[in-house]
Image: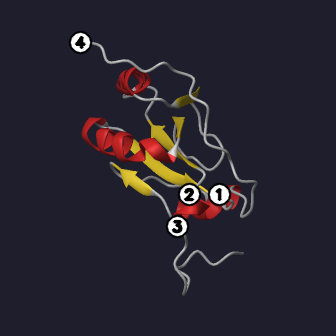
Amino acid sequence: MTDLSNSSVPRPTSEIASFHAHVYYDPAATRLEAERLRSWMGERFSVTLGRWHDVKVGPHDQAMFQVAFAAEIFSELVPWLMLNHGRLSILVHPNTTNPRRDHLADPLWIGPPLAVHGDRLPEEAAMEPAPAPNTQPHLRP
C-alpha cells in the first residue's frame, strides 16, 4: 500500500489533471437543497455534472452526485461552494494517478466530513483529463 503521508520532497501541482467535488445529500431530507445547488452550479460554472446516486456508490457512504471541473476554475468554484453549500457536505479532491490518496490524504471538506472507504479505491489509475463541460453557464438576474 502506498504511504499517504507527506514525502520529503514537495509534489508539483502539475500532478493534478482536474478536480472532483462530491456533493452528499440525504434523499429524504436534503435532496431539494442538493438539486438547487446543482442547478446553481450549472448556471454559473463550466462544470460537468455527474449522475444522481440516491444510494451508496463506490467508496461513498451517502447519496451524492459528482461535479468534475478543470483546475482553472478551482479558485472561483470552491469558495462559491463554501458560501452556498447550506446543510450539504462536499468532498473536493484532485485527480492525480492515485485515486485513494486523492480521496483520503489530499482532499478538502466543505461542511462536516463523512466516511470515505479507501479500500474501495485503487492506488493507481490513468491520469484523468480535464473534463469537457456539459453546461453553458450563465447568470440569471
* Position of 127 relative to 21 (above/below): below
Q: Please say if the residues under marks 1 and 2 sit with CB atoms less than 8 Å apart.
A: yes
What kind of residue is marked 3? Answer: Ala
Q: CA distance from mark 1 to mark 2?
A: 6 Å
Circle 1 residues within 10 Å: few <14, some 14–19, many ≥20: many
In this orientation, does residue 47 appear? Answer: yes
Task: Tell me which residue sits at (46%, 49%) in the image.
Answer: 92
Q: CA distance from mark 2 to mark 4?
A: 36 Å
Q: Please say if the residues under marks 4 and 1 sit with CB atoms less than 8 Å apart.
A: no
Q: CA distance from mark 4 to mark 3?
A: 39 Å
- As helix, strand or loop, the secondary structure at mark 3 comes to loop
Q: Which residue is mark 2?
A: 103
What kind of residue is marked 1? Answer: Pro
What kind of residue is marked 2? Answer: His
- Please tell me the numbered disc located at residue 105: 3
Mark 4 vs mark 3: in front: 4
Q: Which residue is mark 1?
A: 99
Q: Which residue is mark 4?
A: 141
- As helix, strand or loop, the secondary structure at mark 4 comes to loop
Q: Position of residue 131 (x, y in %)?
A: 61, 37
Relative to residue 22, is residue 74 drawn left or right? left
What kind of residue is marked 4? Answer: Pro
